[in-house]
Image (cartoon, grey):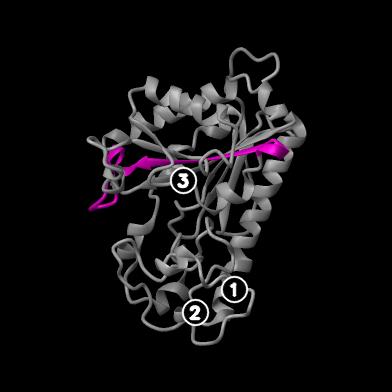
Amino acid sequence: MDGMNAWEPVAAEEIAEPADAFEVRRAAGRVPATPIVFASPHSGRLYPDDMMAAAALDAQSIRRSEDAYVDDLIAGAPGLGVATISARFARAYIDLNREAFELDPSMFADELPEFARARTARVAAGLGAIARVVSEGQEIYARKLTFAEASARIEGAHRPYHETLKRLIEEAHAAHGFAILIDWHSMPAAAARTGGRERPCDMVLGDRFGAACAGLLPARVERELESMGYRVARNTPYAGGYTTEHYGRPARRVHALQIEINRALYLDEATLAPTAGFERLREHLAALTCALAAADWTSLKGA
């Protein structure tokens, strides 16, 4: 940032948003302290009664699909000048990293409207905006849903989440001339071993193969993470989802990057309890946030 050689912690405040849907926190003050926004769309752990009344699985079984505690891993970011938005509703209830009406017709008792996106790879995998299965392939629901139920989830959570995320990006862009969005996720340890690697990777940076951000951003993130001892991969097995694709517009000086964290670094995947590695990882992500906040991003203004 212009004239910035170091970054000092700042006061943070919580911004009131629609009840239960998501949480926004950012540095206090009218002007965004940095051009950076963090998002955690899959870490929500609220399972509303209307979902569980229709479910064949219990909440603990459905939790396998969560990016568990990713919101807690980045919780220090607002105090470092980075705005954060984190889901409260569970990913299985409404997936905020999907198009709003990316829906599987086989899940619904009534016909979906023509504008529904029913033929995507994510829908085919059972992982549309309303998931049909959890990560192990187990069917979530005991009955078919109605389109009215889907609409209620979209209007109550998906739409306001993305309206708010868009506003945070626009505010950062207006204040700094560009914006950086980092969309935080976690991946099963098994996924980190894909791609013919001899050793599993710790982090995967997804930039839609260069389409979602200028190369300076993943290069800087990779360099910082590798200096901490992490093994970093690019775009395999995750190149970025709806959020990265939708908001990443380098030509308009909005740069989006998805970061996937190997759950083995901080989580017992069997019990979904944080392990001893949680605090170490959280400290390292705070150090990464400091480095990004203090970096000279002048070239992104003309990217």
Q: Which residues are magenta?
A: 250-272
Q: Is residue 107 visible?
A: yes
The spot of residue 123 in percent (x, y) is 46, 68
* Residue on which disc 3 sits: 239
Q: Which mark is residue 32?
A: none
Q: Quadrant of residue 192?
A: top left
Q: Which mark is residue 116?
A: 1
Task: Tell me the CA gap for discs 1 and 2.
Answer: 9 Å
Specify whether residue 268 is painted magenta.
yes
Q: Which mark is residue 105?
A: 2
The spot of residue 272 in percent (x, y) is 29, 51
Specify whether residue 180 is painted magenta.
no
Task: Say which residue appears at 44% left-offset and 41% top-offset.
Answer: 235
The spot of residue 89 in percent (x, y) is 49, 60
- Amino acid at the residue labelled 1: Ala
Q: Quadrant of the N terminus?
A: top right
Q: Secondary structure at mark 3?
A: loop
Please tell me which residue lies in front, 5 or 81. 5
Task: Tell me the CA gap for discs 3 and 2.
Answer: 26 Å
Task: Tell me the CA gap for discs 1 and 3.
Answer: 24 Å
Q: Is residue 39 above or below residue 117?
A: above
- Amino acid at the residue labelled 3: Ala
